[in-house]
């Protein structure tokens, strides 16, 4: 295979193979930064302590939390149809989400480092029968090794951002060699489909964005009732999945809003929970009382800002507050997925940097289900209007729910496109009724 590959891809394979002995050093650095799970770091070398289940296995790979959650409903459909599912991802947070949100029989492994040796070891152990790659997390050795084994490869929820497309065009031969090994690419939009086709995808179909069909996150009822009791009579705003640089803006906005809305509580849910203590110290230094959820503190009457630095509780806080600011959008991160918040009845406010979810926010903004705040002043204005006007708040919530409902359906279209592969798996399972 190697002699037929573009020069850049051949060079990548050579370098990644030569770098294999350095994997321990690389893993050690990531461990120090908290980016690896010390109990499971061997999975990065293609080693597993779990056994492969008997029967056909569908392997689904996503880069991190957003991609894995986008496939949650698809994974559940596959489970209910009797298929074994293996999920791989590359982050500690995504592994924690799989453990918390998915059924116990959904297997999770960290994706191996993209060394030919580790990839072959991974594939030898798991021997998947169908591989679904989410969006555009394409590891060359993983793709080439799968294709060499005649493993059906499908790109689902395919997305090509305006920032990525020009970069990929500059390596068009290399990208075409990878995309050309996928049996089919299921794109989120017509524009994504055109970009994938231009880059070398042989078979492209538009199925829509699976994130529109994501189920609302769960919440512990007892914990929710306790928080509702503690905050009864107070107005509450949730700032979800915030990133560095945003908490300072939210603190300033809270300070200004609290002058007009006494008792206002702002709940900050940092995208990376380990930043919780630093955020709480920053808030306390401003003179506003803060509490940390990771310390099992609660938002009592004197608490102005509650730092919810725990994993897997966004569903709880979306149910607590009717107004949600979506983080990652006041800084150039690209925004976070607002669909879960919309499904749980939130009036949504976001910043200008939402390029990771352009179609989603465009639809919500056009349908008046979300409001764009370009800066701190606009953020204060929009939040203040929603706090002051229950009718406007309710109209925004209803509009967001309507938009989300109208743009769903990607799950069914994706399953329709996967039907030939699933029928083959059913045949292999010996099922009479396909």
Image (cartoon, grey):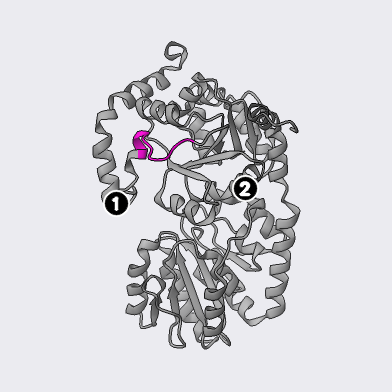
Q: From the viewer's perspective, is residue 264 above or below residue 179?
A: below
- Of badges 1 and 2, nearer the viewer stands 2
Residue 132: image location, x then y, percent: 57, 35
- Name the dominant secondary structure of the magenta segment: loop
Residue 225: image location, x then y, percent: 56, 78
Query: Residue 195 is drawn in which quadrant?
Result: top right
Residue 351: image location, x then y, percent: 54, 61
**Residue name at image x 63 percent, y 23 percent:** 202
Q: Nearer the viewer, residue 181 or 105?
A: 105
Magenta stretch bounds: 43-52
Residue highlighted by disc 2? 76
Q: From the viewer's perspective, is residue 240 above or below residue 161?
A: below
Residues under labels 1 and 2: Cα distance?
33 Å
Q: From the viewer's perspective, is residue 97 above or below residue 412?
A: below
**Residue name at image x 36 percent, y 73 percent:** 295
Query: Residue 28 is drawn in which quadrant?
Result: top left
Q: Is residue 380 magenta?
A: no
Instruction: Give the crowd class for mark 1: few <14, some 14-19, many >=20 residues within 10 Å.
Output: few
Indicate which disc, 1 or 2, sits on the residue closer to the N terminus: 1
Residue 133: image location, x then y, percent: 54, 36
Residue highlighted by disc 1? 33
Q: Nearer the viewer, residue 378 or 397?
A: 397
> In the image, 278: left or right of 222?
left
């Amino acid at each position: 295979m190697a002699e037929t590959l573009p020069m850049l891809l051949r060079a990548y394979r050579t370098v990644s193979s030569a770098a294999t002995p350095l994997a321990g050093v690389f893993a050690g650095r990531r461990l120090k930064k908290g980016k690896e799970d010390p109990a499971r770091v061997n999975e990065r070398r293609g080693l597993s302590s779990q056994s492969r289940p008997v029967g056909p296995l569908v392997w689904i790979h996503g880069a991190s939390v957003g991609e894995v959650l986008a496939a949650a409903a698809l994974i559940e459909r596959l489970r209910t149809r009797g298929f074994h599912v293996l999920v791989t991802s590359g982050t500690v947070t995504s592994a924690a989400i799989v453990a918390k949100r998915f059924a116990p029989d959904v297997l999770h492994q960290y994706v191996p480092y993209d060394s030919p040796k580790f990839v072959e070891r991974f594939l030898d152990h798991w021997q998947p029968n169908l591989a679904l790659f989410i969006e555009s997390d394409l590891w060359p050795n993983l793709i080439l090794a799968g294709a060499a084994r005649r493993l059906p490869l499908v790109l689902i929820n395919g997305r090509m951002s305006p920032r990525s497309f020009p970069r990929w065009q500059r390596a068009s031969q290399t990208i075409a060699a990878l995309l050309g090994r996928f049996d089919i690419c299921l794109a989120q939009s017509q524009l994504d489909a055109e970009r994938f086709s231009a880059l070398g995808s042989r078979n492209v179909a538009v199925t829509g964005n699976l994130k529109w069909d994501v189920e609302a996150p769960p919440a512990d009822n007892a914990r929710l009732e306790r928080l509702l009791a503690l905050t009864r009579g107070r107005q509450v705003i949730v700032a979800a999945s915030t990133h560095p640089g945003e908490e300072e803006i939210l603190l300033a906005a809270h300070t200004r809003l609290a002058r007009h809305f006494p008792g206002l509580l702002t709940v900050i849910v940092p995208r990376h929970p380990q930043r919780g203590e630093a955020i709480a110290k920053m808030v306390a230094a401003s003179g506003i009382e803060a509490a940390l959820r990771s310390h099992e503190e609660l938002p009592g009457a004197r608490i102005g800002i509650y730092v919810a630095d725990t994993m897997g509780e966004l569903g709880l806080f979306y149910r607590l507050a009717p107004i949600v600011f979506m983080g990652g959008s006041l800084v150039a991160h690209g925004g976070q997925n607002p669909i879960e918040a919309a499904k749980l009845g939130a009036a949504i406010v976001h910043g200008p940097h939402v390029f990771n979810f352009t179609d989603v926010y465009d639809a919500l903004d056009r349908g008046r289900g979300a409001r764009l705040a370009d800066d701190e002043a606009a953020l204060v204005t929009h939040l203040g209007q929603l706090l002051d006007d229950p009718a406007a708040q309710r109209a925004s919530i209803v509009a967001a729910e309507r938009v989300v409902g109208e743009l769903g359906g990607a799950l069914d279209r994706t399953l329709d496109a996967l039907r030939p592969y699933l029928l083959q798996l059913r045949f292999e399972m010996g099922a009479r009724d396909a």
